[in-house]
Structures are given as structure tokens and as C-alpha cells.
């Protein structure tokens, strides 16, 4: 089916043979969505045919078509070659010689001089006219796509019906939690990404995946997301709040925050304890629930996110009133 879709897209181009952009998404749902939306925007900007590689793995054990409508997206759930072996792939498959290859993930295998910059002057006849991009993040503006373009592609994604049902249920509860003063008060969405690699306990070698320096930065950022700090931020403007919606990787921390907020400000948490267990946290059910949280966050008046969190960034880009200049 995907071969037919790719062929159909290639035929639809005005040029005789359009260049191909392969976007190999990595890590969790926020990271993959940022890379996917970036790829969609880049392919549209430079008239490229897009192939998305979305492999279910320990980070996210859910295929793309179980999360979003892929009727207009060509994707593959398998990719045998692993980085850095893919950098030498032309040695065993000459077709790879026509690809410029880039990695924008931070990992133990990443060369220190690699940057998140793609080749934008793709022309027919170039030796490397196709692009392979392995990424878990947004594409830099220097590549010719603006943040607004990426947000537009992200907002155009359509969740599958089972995820839509979860989203609708959350939005209904959020609306029920309003105090009736929505014209003057703010509904605050809060995303807590607080579990360090030591708490998360996924079955992976964190140092190998992220690299020691990046892992230290990641854990420092997550450690900064603590109850006292976020309660303090929320309480600064609590009188202006209509309600608070908390999306968190730790139900206990979310509850602690809600308990510190006055009863006059409804505090809503959507959580499933099973989704905190290492063996189930990245399952299809839990990923679908996370996407519902993502959309619920994007529908609040204002978002208080977590530092260095792709999930918080994705929620902001989905928000109807995001300031792209900031």
C-alpha cells in the first residue's frame, strides 16, 4: 500500500523525477512529531517526495497508523540499517550514494561536528539529490522552513478515531471544570516532564542513546521540574486562573501540585497508573493517552511546559495562539 502511495505521489509532481526526503523519526511521541512536522514542511517547501520511517521501539511502541491518519503519508515501520552504519551504506548499496545523510539526534554515536542543517539546494542531476534525515527534534530555521510552517503541518495531522475519542473526553472534562468566568480568566495547561533516566527505567542504555553529556543535561532539566517550583509559579497568578489541567509523567507529583492549589481553582489530572510502569509506559494504549493529553494542553489558554521537553514544544506548536516570534 505504501509503495502505491509513494508511486502516486511521485507521479503527481510536475518534475520528471522529484528528489526524495526520508525522515527517520526517533525517540518519544513529542520528539517524533517535531521531526515529522519538520519533514512535512521541508518536503513541501522544496517540492520533495516524503518517506517517513517510524519504527515502534522501546521509546514508543506504537505504529504511526495507530495514532494518526496516514492516508496522505508514505511511511515504513521498519528500517534495518542502524546509524552509524548507514553513513557507509553506499559501500553495499550504490543507491545510497545519491543521498545526503544527516543525523540530528543527540546520541553516543553522533559526531560532535554534526549540526541540524540539511541540504536545501537540491537540484535534478546532483549526485546527492535525495536526503536521509534521522532526527528527534525540530528542524533549524536555516533550512528554509519557518516555525509557523512546521506548526501548520503539525496542526494538520488528524488523530485516529480511538485517539479522537480520548481527546473529546478530556476536552469535555476540561470544559466541565471551568468556573464560568472564561471570558476573564485563564485555563492553564501544565506539562510536567520530571522523571530522570534513573526513575524512568526503560530497557535501554541511556548513555549509548543520548551520550553522557546530553544525558546529564537531560536529567538536570527534568530534576528542575519539581513540585515546589511549579506550585510557586502557579500560585503567582492563581487569582487569574479559571482552572488548571496537569499532564505529567508522575501522577504523585501532579497530585501534590493539585493539593497545593486552592479549592476555588479546579485542578484536573488525566492519568493511568499503568502508564507509569516501565513495561507499559510506552505501549500503544499509553501513547494514545499521551497524545490526548497533548491536544488537551494545546486547547488551554496558556501552557506552562517543562524545559528541554519536545512534548511541551509540540503542545505549544499545536496551540492556536502560539507566538512564533518568541
Image (cartoon, grey):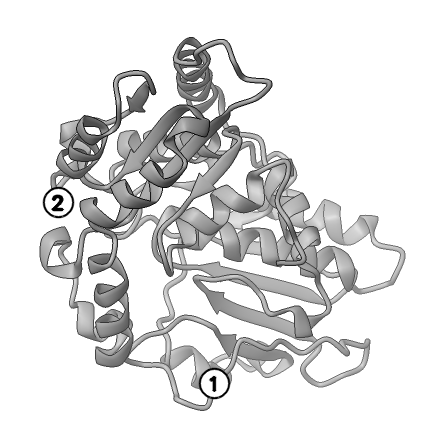
In the image, taking residue 122 as reference, residue 237 lies left or right, namely left
Residue lying furthest right:
14
The quadrant in which residue 4 appears is top right
The reply to whether residue 76 is in sight is no
Q: CA distance from mark 2 to mark 1?
A: 32 Å
Q: Residues within 10 Å of mark 2 (few under 14, many from 20)?
A: some
Q: Earlier in the sequence, mark 2 or mark 1?
A: 1
Quarter that holds the C terminus: bottom right
Q: With respect to residue 11, does 256 lie above or below? A: above
Q: Closer to the camera, 32 or 262?
A: 262
Estimate the x, y position of residue 7 in percent, counting from the top left: 70, 50
- Where is mark 1, residue-wise? 114
Estimate the x, y position of residue 252 in percent, counting from the top left: 13, 35
Q: Closer to the camera, 321 or 17?
A: 321
Q: Residue at x 37, y 38 (%)?
A: 190
Q: With respect to residue 36, does 298 lie above or below? A: above
The reply to whether residue 99 is in sight is yes
In the image, taking residue 29 as reference, residue 286 lies left or right, namely left
In the image, taking residue 311 as reference, residue 47 lies left or right, namely right
- Where is mark 2, residue-wise? 278
Q: Closer to the camera, 196 or 68?
A: 196
Q: Secondary structure at mark 1?
A: loop
Amino acid at each position: 500500500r505504501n509503495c502505491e502511495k509513494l508511486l502516486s505521489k511521485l507521479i503527481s509532481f510536475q518534475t520528471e523525477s522529484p528528489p526524495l526526503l526520508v525522515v527517520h523519526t526517533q525517540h518519544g511521541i513529542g520528539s517524533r512529531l517535531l521531526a515529522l512536522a519538520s519533514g512535512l514542511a521541508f518536503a513541501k517547501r522544496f517540492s520533495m517526495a516524503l518517506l517517513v520511517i517510524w519504527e515502534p521501539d522501546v521509546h514508543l511502541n506504537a505504529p504511526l497508523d495507530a495514532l494518526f491518519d496516514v492516508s496522505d503519508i508514505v511511511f515504513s515501520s521498519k528500517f534495518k540499517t542502524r546509524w552509524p552504519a548507514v553513513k557507509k551504506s553506499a559501500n553495499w548499496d550504490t543507491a545510497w550514494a545519491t543521498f545526503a545523510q544527516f543525523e540530528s539526534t543527540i546520541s553516543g554515536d553522533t559526531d560532535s561536528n554534526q549540526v541540524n542543517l540539511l541540504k536545501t539546494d537540491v537540484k535534478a542531476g546532483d549526485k546527492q539529490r535525495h536526503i536521509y534525515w534521522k532526527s528527534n527534534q525540530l528542524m533549524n530555521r536555516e533550512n528554509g522552513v519557518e516555525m509557523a510552517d512546521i506548526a501548520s503541518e503539525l496542526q494538520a495531522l488528524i488523530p485516529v478515531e480511538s485517539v479522537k475519542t480520548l481527546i473529546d473526553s478530556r476536552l469535555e472534562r476540561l470544559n466541565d471544570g471551568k468556573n464560568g468566568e472564561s471570558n476573564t480568566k485563564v485555563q492553564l495547561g501544565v506539562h510536567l516532564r520530571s522523571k530522570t533516566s534513573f526513575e524512568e527505567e526503560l530497557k535501554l542504555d541511556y548513555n549509548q542513546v543520548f551520550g553522557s553529556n546530553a544525558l546529564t543535561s537531560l536529567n538536570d532539566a527534568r530534576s528542575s521540574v519539581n513540585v515546589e517550583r511549579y506550585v510557586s509559579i502557579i500560585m503567582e497568578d492563581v487569582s487569574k486562573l479559571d482552572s488548571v489541567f496537569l499532564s505529567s509523567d508522575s501522577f504523585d507529583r501532579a497530585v501534590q501540585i493539585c493539593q497545593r492549589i486552592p479549592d476555588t481553582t479546579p485542578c484536573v489530572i488525566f492519568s493511568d497508573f499503568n502508564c507509569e510502569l516501565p513495561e507499559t509506559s510506552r505501549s500503544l494504549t499509553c501513547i494514545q493517552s499521551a497524545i490526548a493529553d497533548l491536544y488537551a494542553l494545546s486547547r488551554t489558554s496558556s501552557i506552562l511546559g517543562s524545559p528541554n521537553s519536545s512534548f511541551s514544544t509540540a503542545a505549544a506548536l499545536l496551540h492556536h495562539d502560539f507566538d512564533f516570534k518568541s
